[in-house]
Image (cartoon, rainbow, N blue to C red):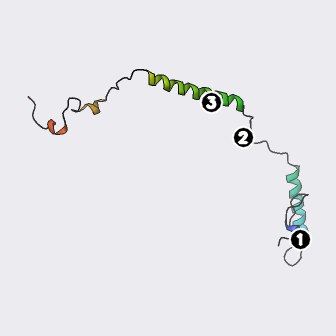
Amino acid sequence: MVRQREMMTDQGPQQCDEDDYGYVSQEASAYYAKLMDKYTSMPAEEPKFPQSKKPVVKDLNAAKDRVRAALQKEEEEEMMPHKRKRKSKSDKGGEENGETERDDDRPRS
């Protein structure tokens, strides 16, 4: 069970001043009060990363436009005649002429 004086109160943080035997150090209490006054008198820090308001509606409309354009581009590409892709030199080998690897070992004249 937590004692009332050991928990956060409405007035602010409260330090447990008594030890297990009921002794209260006046010096420690004065130091704690001085420290808490120092922290409460400090100005609030500005956030290092400011929270900017995001224009949600503008971003949503731009995203919708990009998706529509991408879908339209895909449809246009499907309607166009297909082009043959150029094969790279490593793909050419002997397979274009119907030759296989077994045929490459025989001498050519």
Secondary element type, mark 1: loop
- Marks 3/1: CA–CA distance: 64 Å
Q: Quadrant of residue 56?
A: top right
Mark 3 or 2, nearer chain start: 2
> Residue at position x 46%, y 24% from top?
77
Which mark is nearer the camera, 3 or 1? 3
Given the current orientation, which residue lies at the most extreme bottom position?
21
Q: Position of residue 38 (x, y in %)?
A: 87, 53
Q: Work out whether 44 lies above or below 14.
A: above
- The x and y percentages for residue 45 are 80, 44
The quarter in which the N terminus is drawn is bottom right
Q: Name the residue that disc number 3 marks.
A: 63
Q: Which residue is mark 2?
A: 49
Asked whether 77 or 14 is in front, the reply is: 77
Classify 69 as above or below 19. above
Taking the image as shown, residue 87 lies to the left or right of residue 50, namely left
* Element at label 3: helix
Q: Give residue 74's position: percent from left, percent from top.
A: 49, 26
Task: Give the tally of numbered discs.
Answer: 3
On the image, numbered disc 1 is attached to which residue? Answer: 25
Q: Residues within 10 Å of mark 2 (few under 14, many from 20)?
A: few
For label 3, the crowd category at 10 Å Cα-Cα, with few meaning under 14, some 14 to 19 and many 20 or more, is few
- Give yes or no for contact between labels 3 and 1 (Cβ–Cβ under 8 Å): no
The mark lying in front, picked from 1 and 2, is 2
Q: Nearer the viewer, residue 5 or 41?
A: 5
Q: Is residue 72 left or right of residue 13?
A: left
